[in-house]
Amino acid sequence: MRMNRYHYKECGLDNIIIEGIDILEDADGEEVIHIPRINQLHRIIAEAILRRPSRLSGKELRFLRTRMGKTQAQLAELLHRDVQTIARWEKGEVDMDGNAETLFRLIAAEEMAIDLGADVRTVSRWSIVQSGPREIVISMNENGSYRLKAA
């Protein structure tokens, strides 16, 4: 059976919707959500976050950092900040400053081989736009591949 819309919170973000996800039944007869190709899904989420012209939330920063395989200490070194600053950003206690966010987006895109489709000036402008996190909607087609539908 296919579920029309699934609110995918398991990745640590509150605004991810997957359309067309399969619902399976386990050995006990309980319904379980089957999410194949997690790496492909998380890459599409990362691309959507990095390309969206709005400030990164703390949860988005944490998602991207972990997707990059970096610790808070490693990210702090890359951005020339202390570990506590990274932790405060991720907890949403303080916003990342625009310069650090721009540098982070560029480093993350490079490390994950994501084409931002924008020059540095444009990416810099994305880092100051104030807007709340919109839904990122990803659809899964019949062969189990994902595609970004809306961000």
Image (cartoon, rainbow, N blue to C red):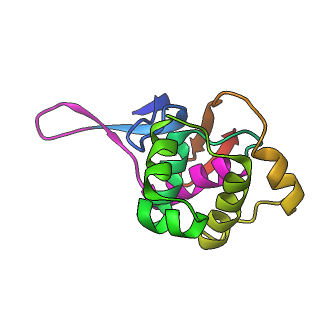
User: In the rendered image, which quarter contains the C terminus?
Assistant: top right
Give 19 or 68, whichever is nearer the viewer. Answer: 68
Q: For this view, does 113 lie left or right of residue 26?
A: right
| Residue 6 included in the magenta stretch of the image | no
**In the figure, residue 3 lies in which quadrant?**
top left
Counting from the top left corner in percent of width and height, residue 6 is at: 46, 31
**In the figure, residue 15 lies in which quadrant?**
top right
Counting from the top left corner in percent of width and height, residue 147 is at: 64, 49
**In the figure, residue 106 lies in which quadrant?**
bottom right
User: In the rendered image, which quarter contains the N terminus?
Assistant: top left
Give 11 or 6, whichever is nearer the viewer. Answer: 11
| Residue 28 included in the magenta stretch of the image | yes
Residue in the image at 58% along x and 49% along y: 45
Number of numbered discs on residues? 0
Residue in the image at 81% along x and 52% along y: 124
| Residues shaded magenta | 25-51
Counting from the top left corner in percent of width and height, residue 132 is at: 66, 27
